[in-house]
Image (cartoon, rainbow, N blue to C red):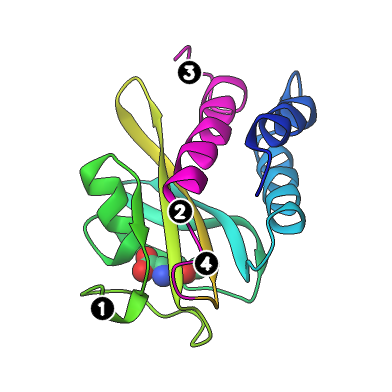
């Protein structure tokens, strides 16, 4: 089981007082990808003029733009809440960037109630992500909101 408290602290140590958003998110994606077992993609989509655009990530090349409301990422952005998908093949509108992906979790990044991006994680294993992963990844995203996106959440 992942120690999300330790992971959040490690993410905070990587991004605190580093005034370079891309560098911070690249390091956060790398840390998440190497720390969480059984993950084939970990990274960010960032809101640009109302559309989610691919940001720093680890894994295979992925689709560049996702509209709000589209796919798992766009659904999380629209609802402003995490979306945990045990089986992506049963999620209507799922965007298959990698055919090997079977489960996914997306956590929105919020600053003053506005979605500024999402954290997306994919796995080849059905049901890879649990509620415990969701809570832990939300904790990690809170650190990024505070230190990378300038929110005072
Ligand atoms: N599956 C996502 C698209 C992004 S990739 O997984 C990296 C979705 O349905 O939004």
Q: Is mark 3 within 8 Å of ligand 1?
A: no
User: Do we see residue 95 in this rendering?
Assistant: yes
- State the SS at label 2: loop
Q: Residues within 10 Å of mark 2 (few under 14, many from 20)?
A: few
Residue 141 location in percent, x, y?
Answer: 52, 35
- The mark that comes first in sequence, 3 or 1, is 1
Residue in front for this viewpoint, 130 or 71: 130
Q: Are marks 3 and 1 in contact (CB under 8 Å)?
A: no
Disc sitting over residue 151 in the figure: 3
Q: Is there a contact, CB below 8 Å, between mark 4 and mark 2?
A: no
Distance in Å between CA atoms under marks 3 and 1:
35 Å
Q: Which region shows up in magenta?
A: 126-153
Residue receiving disc 1: 90
Q: Choose the circle earlier in sequence order: 4 or 1.
A: 1
Q: Is residue 129 magenta?
A: yes
Residue at the top extreme of this rendering: 152
Q: Residue at x 43, y 43 (%)?
A: 117
């Amino acid at each position: 089981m992942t120690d999300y408290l330790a992971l959040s602290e490690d993410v905070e140590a990587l991004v605190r007082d580093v005034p370079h958003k891309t560098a911070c998110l690249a390091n956060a994606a790398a840390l998440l990808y190497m720390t969480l077992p059984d993950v084939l993609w970990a990274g960010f989509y960032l809101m640009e003029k109302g559309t989610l655009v691919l940001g720093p990530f680890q894994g295979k090349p992925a689709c560049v733009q996702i509209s709000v409301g589209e796919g798992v990422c766009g659904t999380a952005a629209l609802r402003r809440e995490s979306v945990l998908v045990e089986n992506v093949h049963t999620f209507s509108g799922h965007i298959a960037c990698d055919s090997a992906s079977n489960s996914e979790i997306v956590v929105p990044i919020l600053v003053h109630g506005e979605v500024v991006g999402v954290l997306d994680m994919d796995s080849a294993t059905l049901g890879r992500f649990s509620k415990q992963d969701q809570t832990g990844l939300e904790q990690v995203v809170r650190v990024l909101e505070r230190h990378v996106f300038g929110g005072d959440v």
